[in-house]
Each structure stands twice: as structure tokens, then as C-alpha cells.
Image (spheres, rainbow, N blue to C red):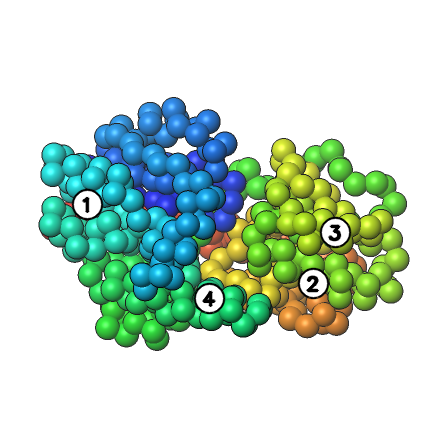
Amino acid sequence: MKILFLSHRLPFPPNKGDKIRSHALFTHLAARHQLYLGSFVDDQADFAYEGIVHEMASGGCKLIALPRHRKLLSSVQALANGASITAEVYRSTEMRTWVDHVLKTEKIDCAVVFSSAMAPYLLDSPHLPPERVLFDMVDLDSDKWLQYSGTTGRIASWVYRREAKKLLELERQAAAKFAYTYLVSDHEVKSFARLAPESRDRIRAFCNGVNLDYFAPGQYDTPFPCKETPIVMTGRMDYWPNVDGASWFAREILPLVKQRIPDARFYAVGAQPAPSLSALANPDVVVTGEVPDVRPYVAAASVVVAPLRIARGVQNKVLEALAMGVPTVATEEASRALAVSSGRDIWVANDARGFADAVVRAAGAGREIVAANGRTYVEKHHDWNNQLSAIDSALEQVGAR
């Protein structure tokens, strides 16, 4: 089929949360159909993959740079004109013109919209019926904004609550018009169905997968000194939920762990660490910055942690740690989208004392059994090939219309 694929970030490389999902979906569809890709590029380094993307999207590409200053300006404009900040940031006459041109000149069978930010380009299109559009909303982003509102000052809290309301309106509008709306887990589906009951029958789960060959138990050169118990957290360290979680672990949880494991050391492994996180570095807390490969850090870790207090959907960092057969401790927020059991596949705790206790257990006897169960769980429930087959079936159905 000829498929229009719209994404708010270039689906290459798979180096951060939503891009792991968009990359898997994009490469899967590109191997089977003729794709037309419209995407924004918010990281200048991603343009290094432009040639690969053009080759894969054989129908054609439209890539538009999205610099930081444009995001800031669009946010101010959204507050002034009553629009959603998310929608305003990604509103582009250039992209709109390209989308309309493709739809008018090519016999597009159906479209895939990745993220709420891109939904406006097809919501009211006169060139493609909305019942031929699949909408991958990924997470319930409106609720994430609502979670942010409880963690900051009064003015920012008002902005976040406003965006949560505006974005939920857009999410509901898109779900009501498009053929099917996909979210990353059954938990997200149930949450959104409660907020958008009018679209309940068309909201479905398309769970995240993990590259089981790449993230697999194996031998790596350890990046850690010999005589220590390394505790590792991975992720983009400029992403606020990660910054908050890593800071919480360093300040409140690690001291409790060290009372029982004196040689414990915490590693926050990820690109572009926020200044507030870098300031926490000390002999017991290492903020690495970007590393060429996270797998040696994960493989050699005594425990991998995901101490997220703000989270929606499936956390790739948790899936990757489980896939590598490493004992993992996560908050309920970071693990509730998974069909795992605490103490069997993973350890789950939400307060500082309970999280520290779980880390100590994960570093102790019996850890190998739970780690092996985690790998088995991921193999069973998060193989990309199995997850993407649901999209194939839906595309056949929608394309037939």
C-alpha cells in the first residue's frame, strides 16, 4: 500500500523513548509498503540519518528542523491564542502544504499518525477520509502534563494544567474521528477510555517491544571499578521525569542503601544531564553524560533502577534491563503498564525506604531467578514482531476501505 506516515520526531535513530517505538513502526512498514514520511527534526544530529530515511521512505520525505527557539516562541503564541502548546509547536504551513500535496497527487491508501502533535494535519483533511487513518497516540500525554502540574510553582502549574486540558480535547477529537487509536499498554487504554468514552470501542493497545537480540544477556567489558556495587539508571538525563527520579534516588534512597551496602555507588547514565543533576555528583553518585553504548553499564550493574515518580506508558529502560537479565527495581509508575509481579519478574516499591529495601533484595541472594524471569517475561510479551502484527491487520482492514 501507499502509506503517509507523520511523526513529530524523526524515527531515526532509536535513541530515546518515543523514537524507539516510531523507529520500530517506521522500519516495519517501510519493509512492506511504500511510505511517504513527514517529520520534524528536533535534534540537528539526526540529520545524519537523512539519507537512510529517504531511502526507506521510497515515496518521498519532508523533514523540517524544529529548533529550540521555535519551541519557546510557539509556546508563547499558544498561550496568547488559546491553543494547545503541543499543537502550536508542531503547526507548520510548510508541512501542511506538503501533506496536502501528497494526498492530492498520490493515491494514498491510508495514513499512520504518530503522536497527538501530528493529528491536526489529518483531522479535517478534505483529501483523506479519517476512517483511513491509524492514530498511534503512544501515551496519554495530557495526563503527563497534569502530573507535571503537581511538581512545580504556581504559574508553571497553571500552564501545565491548561495544557493538560487543551491536549485532552485534541486527543479526544482525534480518537473520535480516526479509525483506531493505539496506546502503549492496556493500562493506558483503560485510562483513556474513561476520559473518552465516546471512542471506547476504537481504542486499542499496541505494546512496546524490545530488540531481544541487541538487549540480551552477554559478556561486556565492565565500566565499573572492581570493588563496588554499581546501581544504574539509564535514560535521557535532560528529561524532567528522569531528572526528578535520579535526583530522588541520589538524595533520599542511596543513603539508605549504603547503610546496608557500604560500597554501593549510583550511576545516572544518559545524555545531556541537567545541571541540577550534575550538581549531585560526588564519590557515591556518578553522572556519566552520553555514553556510546548503555549495554555494558546495564550488563555489569548489580541492580538497574527506574525510580520514576512521573511516568506514563511503558518505560523502555525497564524493558531493556529485563531483557538483559539484570535485577531491576522500579516504582509503580514506571512498571504499572507491564504485566509483571513484584518479587517474581522485578521489584516494585514507591517510597524511599521501600525502594531502598527492594534494591538491597535485588542485590542479594535469589536475584538470578528473578532476573531470569524478567527476561522470560519480555520474550513472551514484548517481542516487536508480535506487537507489530496488530498494526498489519489494522492496515489491511483500513486500507480496504
Residue 339 visible here: no
Give whichever of discs 3 and 2 has the lower sequence position: 2
Residue in view at x 24 percent, y 33 percent: 34
Give whichever of discs 1 and 3 has the lower sequence position: 1
Locate residue 82, reporting x and y percent: 32, 64
Locate residue 107, reporting x and y percent: 12, 37
Q: Which residue is mark 2?
A: 248
Q: Which residue is mark 1?
A: 110
Q: Which residue is mark 3?
A: 279
Residue in view at x 37 percent, y 46 percent: 8
Q: CA distance from mark 1 to mark 3?
A: 49 Å
Give whichever of discs 1 and 2 has the lower sequence position: 1
* Between marks 1 and 3 in the image, the one whose residue lies nearer the viewer: 3
In which image quadrant can residue 368 be found?
bottom right
- Dot 4: element: helix
* Between marks 1 and 2 in the image, the one whose residue lies nearer the viewer: 2
